[in-house]
């Protein structure tokens, strides 16, 4: 008989070596389950106060409740969003840095050389919100609906002007996409920001602009603006009589200020899945969802795959438009 000390060690019938391995695996699983263990930073390409900031702060507050850890915003405005995007691309891929971005993420690569690759330097996490654009006009404009606008623009090429927050911004490229599909010519007047672009529309300096329901609804209600059409896939519940551009002869046309979360390339899949699930839960929280709907904002569905498809499609769309319309970042 072998001495007792030479017998293989067991615990409840299990060899100790196997037990130790099982414990280590269990420990690793427990460590992963602790995510997040510290605050998560969200880099935002815009200054405080705008629509994107308001939505982002609401989402971050909900995520903080869900995770039990702070989710804080790091504001990095400037250079059309490239400063924030570069900072996110260079951040550690550990699940604790996110970038909340918008269509500037897919427009910028068509306009300028960037110090990062929009597709390969990031992993998509989740869509957060879709803000449909509204085509609005000055009340003195010689048309009251979308079809009459097209007729007038065709009969008076170049006579109408539209404002935007600047060359290469979403209102600029989505308007140019519409004009090319409609085969009409309206002159673009770029401004340094959405506020002065809206101010000159209200003053009658320009006749048209893409805006959002949140900023134009009260102006339209008081007769200071008129809404010609919406660029969402469906009519706004708040404006049931206003048609979409898609149903007005341009099927498939959309104009959305979408907000999405991406993370640095290499971010662990477990962290991406956890954040995506938390965002989905956050935007469907009753108070939050009600707030979005009140401002004419859609709550999107779909996780990382949905956002990945959107980014890939828009990169192609804006690259083609910038080339065909000869749009330059210096315009």
Image (cartoon, rainbow, N blue to C red):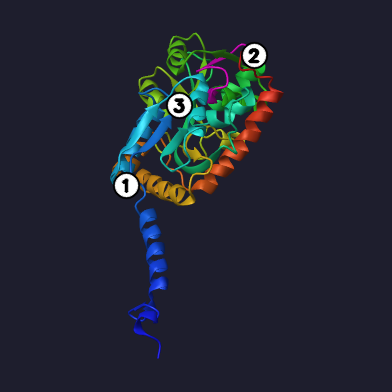
- Helix, strand or loop at label 1? It is helix
For the residues marked 1 and 3, what is the alpha-carbon distance in whole angstroms? Answer: 24 Å
Using the rendered view, name the quadrant where residue 187 is placed. top right
Task: Tell me if residue 252 can be seen.
Answer: no
Give the residue number, with chain letter if any, for mark 1.
67
Give the residue number, with chain letter if any, for mark 2.
156
Please tell me which residue lies in front, 218 or 81.
81
Residue 228: percent from left, percent from top: 50, 26
Q: Is residue 75 above or below residue 197?
A: below
Q: Is residue 170 magenta?
A: yes
Residues packed near mark 2 inside 10 Å, few (<14), some (14 to 19) or many (20 plus)? few
The image's mark for residue 45 is 3
Q: Nearer the viewer, mark 2 or mark 3?
A: 3
Q: Earlier in the sequence, mark 2 or mark 1?
A: 1
Q: Is residue 109 left or right of residue 282?
A: right
Task: Tell me if residue 280 can be seen.
Answer: yes
Residues packed near mark 1 inside 10 Å, few (<14), some (14 to 19) or many (20 plus)? some
Q: Residue furthest bottom?
A: 1
- Helix, strand or loop at label 3? It is loop
Residue under the image location 47 percent in, 19 percent down: 78
Residue 247: percent from left, percent from top: 57, 37
Residue 99: percent from left, percent from top: 46, 34
Residue under the image location 49 percent in, 24 percent down: 83
Query: What is the magenta range?
Result: 156-171
């Amino acid at each position: 008989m072998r001495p007792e000390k030479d017998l293989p060690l067991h615990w409840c019938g299990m060899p100790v070596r196997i037990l130790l391995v099982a414990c280590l695996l269990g420990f690793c699983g427990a460590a992963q389950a602790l995510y997040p263990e510290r605050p998560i930073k969200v880099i935002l390409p815009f200054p405080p106060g705008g629509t994107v900031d308001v939505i982002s702060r609401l989402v971050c507050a909900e995520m903080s409740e869900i995770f039990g850890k702070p989710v804080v915003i790091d504001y990095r405005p400037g250079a059309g969003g490239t400063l924030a995007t570069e900072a996110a691309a260079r951040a550690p891929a550990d699940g604790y840095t996110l970038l909340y971005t918008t269509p500037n993420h897919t427009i910028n690569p068509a306009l300028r050389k960037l110090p990062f690759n929009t597709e390969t330097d990031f992993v998509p996490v989740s869509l957060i919100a879709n803000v449909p654009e509204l085509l609005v006009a000055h009340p003195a404009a010689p048309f009251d609906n979308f079809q009459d606008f097209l007729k007038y623009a065709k009969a008076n090429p170049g006579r109408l002007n539209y404002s935007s927050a600047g060359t290469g911004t979403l209102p600029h490229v989505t308007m140019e996409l519409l004009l090319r599909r409609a085969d009409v010519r309206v002159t673009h007047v770029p401004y340094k920001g959405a506020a002065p672009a809206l101010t000159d529309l209200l003053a009658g300096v320009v006749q048209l602009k893409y805006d959002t329901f949140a900023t134009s609804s009260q102006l339209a209600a008081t007769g200071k603006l008129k809404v010609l059409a919406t660029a969402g896939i469906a009519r706004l519940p708040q404006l049931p009589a206003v048609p979409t551009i898609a149903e007005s002869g341009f099927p498939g046309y959309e104009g959305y200020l979408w907000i999405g979360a991406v993370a640095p390339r290499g971010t662990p899949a477990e962290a991406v899945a956890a954040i995506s699930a938390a965002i989905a839960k956050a935007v469907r929280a009753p108070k939050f969802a009600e707030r979005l709907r009140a401002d004419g904002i859609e709550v999107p569905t779909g996780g990382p795959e949905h956002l990945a498809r959107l980014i890939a499609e828009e990169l192609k769309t804006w690259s083609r438009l910038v080339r065909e319309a000869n749009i330059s970042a210096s315009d």
